[in-house]
Structure formats: C-alpha cells, structure tokens
Image: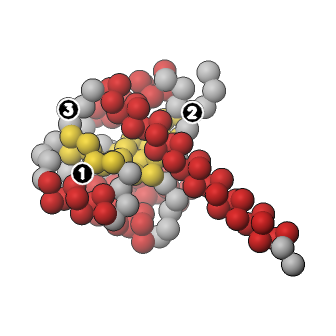
Amino acid sequence: MSNKGRILIVDDEDRFRASLKHILGKSGFEAMAVADGMAALHVLEKGEVDVVVLDSNMPNLSGEDVFTIIKKHGIAVEIILLTGVPVIENALKMMRNGVFDYLTKPIAIEQLLSVIESAVANKRIRNWDTGAVDILNNNVD
C-alpha cells in the first residue's frame, strides 16, 4: 500500500488515539500519535506532516491554542479539529481562521477518513501551487 499522506493525531484519549492510528495505518496513511499539544508541536518542528487531527479539549494547551501556534509559525499543515462539545461560535471562528474542518465526536470513521483524504489533497495542491510559482519566478528574467 502506498503512503496516502502523513497524519498527526493529537488527542489525550489513549483508546481513541491508538484506534485512529491503527485505522489510518491500515488505510494507507503514515500515522503518528501524541497525547498533548506540546508533543504535537515538537513533532511538527522535526518533520513534514500533511494533516493534524487535533482534539479541541486537552489539558494545558487546547486544540485552539495549538492551532494558533501552528498558524503563527507558518507551519504548512491542514488542521482537522475534533470536539466532543460543539459550540457554533467556536466552529465558525476556527473555520474563518483557517481550520480545514471542525468535526464533532463521536464521528463515523468513514466520514473522518473522507475529510482526512480531502485535507491531504488540499495540502498537496497548495504545495504544488507554491512550487509551480517558485519555478515560474526562477525562469522569468
């Protein structure tokens, strides 16, 4: 099976994190999983990730806090925010600020896989567009 994308799962619920990592691996993704926002930021510093599946309600750094740090540092990833307690105002704010999607737990795995695939495709298109612009700019005198 080919690598369909690199996914970072950030969730403080051990069972959810382990289950999703297993399912993503069987579905052809390269999946990594961490239990908190600080660990997520360390992973993002070290390597390329396409999509971060980020729990909104975690101790210390919330998902929204982690998203804000990622955005502030210009880390090129798509963020899928998961919440167990949906608040429409938060969802609208996060979507306006650039979250790829804002989903409610529990979620059907088929739906989550579909959103992850769309997010990976969006990231790759964005990277291709940036690369194409760089190539064109270097070739124009």
Query: Can residue 15 be spotted in the picture?
Result: no
Alpha carbons under labels 1 and 2: distance apart: 25 Å
Q: Which residue is mark 1?
A: 56
Q: Are marks 2 and 3 in contact (CB under 8 Å)?
A: no
Residue occupying image coordinates x 46% and y 40%: 118
User: Around disc 3, counting alpha carbons within 10 Å, would you say few (fewer than 14), some (14 to 19), or many (20 or more)?
Assistant: few
Disc 3 residue type (three-letter): Pro
Disc 1 residue type (three-letter): Ser
Name the secondary structure under disc 2.
loop
Q: Which residue occupies the foreground of this view, 17 or 75?
A: 75
User: Around disc 2, counting alpha carbons within 10 Å, would you say few (fewer than 14), some (14 to 19), or many (20 or more)?
Assistant: some
Residue 25 lies, with reference to residue 126, above or below; the image says above
Q: Which residue is mark 3?
A: 106
Sequence order check: which comes first, mark 2 or mark 3? 2
- Circle count: 3
Quadrant where the image shows the N terminus: top right
Q: Which residue is mark 2?
A: 4
